[in-house]
Amino acid sequence: MDDIQSKLKSPSKASREDIFGRVISYTCIAAIILLVVSILYFIASRGLATFTSNHVNLISFLTGQEWNPGALDAHGHPQVGALPMIVTSFSVTVLSALVATPFAIAVALFMTDIAPKNGAKFLQPVIELLVGIPSVVYGFIGLTVVVPIIRQIFGGTGSGILAGTIVLFVMVLPTITSLSVDALRSIPSYFRSASLALGATRFQTIYKVLLRAAMPRLLTAVIFGMARAFGEALAVQMVIGNAVLMPHNLITPTSTLTSQLTTNIGNTIMGTLPNNALWSLALILLLMSLVFNLLIRYIGKRGAIKS
Amino acid sequence: MTAILLTKNVHLSYGKKEALHGIDLDFDEHGITALIGPSGCGKSTFLRCLNRMNDLIPRTTVTGTFNFKGQDIYAPTTNLVELRKQIGMVFQQPNPFPFSVYENVTYGLRLTGHKDRQFLDEQVERSLKQAAVWDEVKDDLNKSALSFSGGQQQRICIARLLAVQPDIILLDEPTSALDPISSAQIETTLLALKNEYTIIIVTHNLQQASRIADKTAFMLNGNLVEFDLTSKMFTQPEQQDTSDYLNGKFG
Ligand SMILES: Nc1ncnc2c1ncn2[C@@H]1O[C@H](COP(=O)(O)OP(=O)(O)OP(=O)(O)O)[C@@H](O)[C@H]1O
Ligand SMILES: [Mg+2]
């Protein structure tokens, strides 16, 4: 009797294992949270040092067009105007996403609705391959193929926003495509049958039901692609020209936030203004990826199909 | 009664497997015909032949005669889009689009290019009234159709079909996902519709068939066993199999 009672009162093997598993996962979660918080803290403290210890004006940082953190201007202020890089970063991001989206959705529709069997069989590996190619390879192809072609056609150096857009287009295409495929596959097939049974053609069904029902998730796919384009550094650096100048058109050499970081972070000394200024650029990148994330969440929540 | 749809010697194979072994069924204009039979006997398959929804399933072959108002449904010249507007279908699961009620009901009309707001408004009201959901949704026409109950959604789907004014309405177990009260409402709706439309309904619910159908067809293993007036079949079935099925001996 006592034996049974003590057995019942003491934790069983299963519940001990349960506690053990929980301890392991909480430890891992704590480690990851610590890591994330320290990264955020590090970037923020460095990035804000430009404004706190170097006394750069935030407004002039965001709107200034002269970037030469090592030198002072006529009034004795450091030249840290990040606007050209901000503009270029946004330009290549938006342009590449704009160009890639129609292609991506067309390919996704081909795989899900037009030729679901053979299309997916053939295109799925192609997309996976495109995702797997390292960005330096894209940049290299951009440098040796895209830039010379642009130079031939438009003159100039060939580097600039156009070259960056073309390279990024190829890089975000698989991202947007595969997420669009997921979006379209998540639309229950009974919407398709309902539409066809009402006398809709396949094109009408795609256009009026599928794309519309999948719209929130398609938008999410595009934003994911934009986040990838915004954060891409190496490939862009190889074709953008790396001159911190305000872009006047699509083919003048310029620089993105990321390309400026990769180009110069090794050439500056920790704690000095040129270094801090780069951290400020990193902080902008971080904040932007936060914005992209929030957008994705917001759209995802608003657009979830209620059932 | 004149038959609006005549089928003869219908065979259908999914790949190599034959699911229908020669069905002859004629459907009278303005009436309800029920298809009953145990699971897997081919009721849905036969129903899908009638508006060629089987075309969507790869590797199906259909043979036989399908005569709808004098035209051959499977003729190469048949316009599928037109056909499906004349022979519409309601599915087992309510499947309104994730749009507003108004957009659901006007979907078929917009496909054919109707844009006149007043005309659309009238059709929405007429269809929803005919489908007997008008009173429940009239204040929420701009709400998502998915925010209504299953029974209301199913009647919205019926309204969506009625808006394009089909001749024949095919229903595949339209009440099997619904509670008894919603089912009863759908039955009432169908009874009211049968004066204007030809209704063909697949059902597992024998009481439902006996309550609403003018004629009933009993299928078994891809064959048509018996087809007669419902009142006759449920009281004096001619075949032993029919009698066994109606008495719950199998299926
Ligand atoms: N898409 C398909 N591919 C291959 N075989 C199928 C397909 N659909 C149905 N079948 C087969 O055809 C036969 C008839 O199926 P059907 O769905 O028409 O039966 P049913 O009478 O509607 O059954 P239930 O009452 O369960 O809905 C079954 O043996 C089924 O396995
Ligand atoms: Mg069925």
Image (spheres, helix red, strand yellow):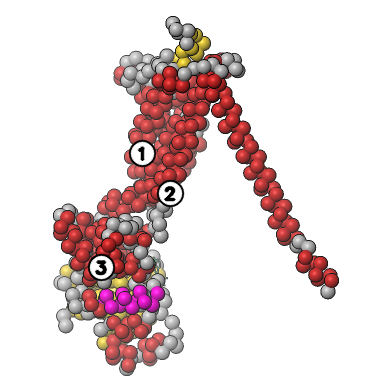
Task: Please determine whether, in this image, residue B49 is positioned above or below residue A212.
Answer: below
Label 3, label 1: how far apart the Cα atoms are: 41 Å
Quadrant where the C terminus of chain A sits is bottom left
Magenta residues span B179-190
Task: Tell whether B140 sits left or right of A217.
Answer: left
Badge 2 is on which residue?
A301
The residue shown at (31%, 53%) is A209
Could one spot residue B50 in this view of the protein? no
Is B188 colored magenta in this rendering? yes
Give the label on residue A15, or none: none
Label 2, label 3: how far apart the Cα atoms are: 30 Å
Instruction: Choose between A104 and B192: the one closer to the eye.
Output: B192
Badge 3 is on which residue?
B134
Give the label on residue A101, or none: 1
Task: Tell whether B50 sits left or right of A19.
Answer: left
Residue mark closest to the camera, 2 vs 1: 2
